[in-house]
Image (cartoon, grey):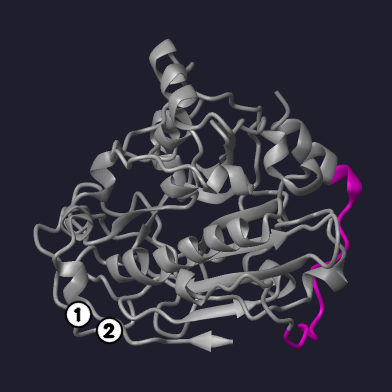
Amino acid sequence: MIYSPLKTSFFYLSSLTLSVCAALTLSGCELSNNTPSQVNTDAIKPIAAQQTTDSQTKQQNQNTSPSYQSFSCIDQFYQQSPPVIRNKTTKHIYPICHDDFAVMYSGEKRVSLWVAQKLTKARVSQSLKREDSFKEYTHGIPTEHQAKLSDYKGSGYDRGHMAPNAHMGTKSSQSDSFYLTNMVPQTPNSNQNDWREIEEAVRKMVRNTNRDTYVITGPAFLNNKNNPEKFIPCDKIDRNDKNEQPAKQCSQPAKNRIQVPTHTYKAVYFTSPKGTPFISAYFVENDRDPKVEVMSVCELEKKIGIYLFPELDDETKKLVYDMPLSAGKVTTQPPKKLQSYTGKCLPALDPARIQTEKTKFQQ
């Protein structure tokens, strides 16, 4: 299903969020195929959370979220099985255990390849005041592979959360959500409209259905006829519109450091101890007027070359549900099942590879 709803921008022009995000920019970046070809010679080791929560933050957590207990890193994944990148030769990737969410970060693209969270009703029912504190993550990542705050200066792209600030149940996990390892460059209209509404819809579904829900979110780097393997000029917000006006104060020094995704995705699996679980994926163009598509996890995995839920069977991954695109469209009942995906899924995965990925996130 493809959606392209009309957007009303006047409301957002008066928003403080837009005024802040519009000032954030990123220089031009190269789009690459989702299947890297370089040989990985790096030994990848688990990376623990960068900071130990101090006593003040612990007290804040107790005061703001008494009913919620954070999950361990490995528990963010369905059946404790992290996503597996199909191409084993991917170079310079770093597993990171942030507070209550897990990340696989690319040192080449300088963005997260995927971010994983386990959501529960208790977690998404917390109400924490947003405190913007974007920051660099330096622990265990070589300097040349680190994303910098300066990288986002001057292009017109937002620093788009993959694990949303509003999905966090404690102050410390909320703080971790502002690391650049949890960000990808998104067009303001995508980040502040379609993407935000999808995040709100997922939270409301979790609250309404009261199911443990596993969410994998990330960027996609797909070729298309308009942009075959080219650097994106920092003065182009909409890569498909040659008449796009240049962004103000375009910053050249950081050009080509961060790769801008063509799309972002969010795969959600709502488990159920009783009844039928449901599953689908959102796929959103990273453009000024983005299209939103709801598809099976099977189809999404083929597009991005990542096994998002390695322990799920193909028939489950082929299911497609009528997922709501905004919180206002969420009902008290699970979404209706649509026609399943009829194509083939990725080839069967070697169990040994699943086990290898598990060891990267076990602390």
* Residue 241's disc number: 2
Q: Residue at x 51, y 66 (%)?
A: 201
Residue 117 can be seen in this image: no
- In the displayed structure, 191 sits above or below 107; it is below
Q: Residue at x 26, y 55 (%)?
A: 26
Few, some or many residues within 10 Å of mark 1 (<14, 14–19, 20+): few
As shown in the figure, which amino acid type bears the numbered disc 1? Answer: Glu
Q: Which residue is mark 1?
A: 244
Q: Residue at x 40, y 63 (%)?
A: 196
Residue 99 can be seen in this image: yes
- In the displayed structure, 195 sits above or below 36; it is below
Q: Which residues are magenta?
A: 338-353
Viewport quadrant of the N terminus: bottom right
- In the displayed structure, 216 sits above or below 247; it is above
Residue 292 appears left or right of 22: right
Q: Position of residue 85 (x, y in %)?
A: 69, 53
Q: Quadrant of residue 33?
A: bottom right
As shown in the figure, which amino acid type bears the numbered disc 2? Answer: Asp
Q: Which sits in the foreground, 275 or 136? A: 275
Q: Position of residue 264 (x, y in %)?
A: 49, 65
Q: Secondary structure at mark 2?
A: loop
Q: Is residue 346 magenta?
A: yes
Few, some or many residues within 10 Å of mark 2 (<14, 14–19, 20+): few
- Magenta stretch, main secondary structure, is loop
> Circles 1 and 2: CB distance less than 8 Å?
yes
Q: Which sits in the foreground, 322 or 149? A: 322
Residue at far left of view: 249
Q: Quadrant of residue 181?
A: top left
Q: Position of residue 83 (x, y in %)?
A: 71, 50
Residue 7 appears left or right of 171: left
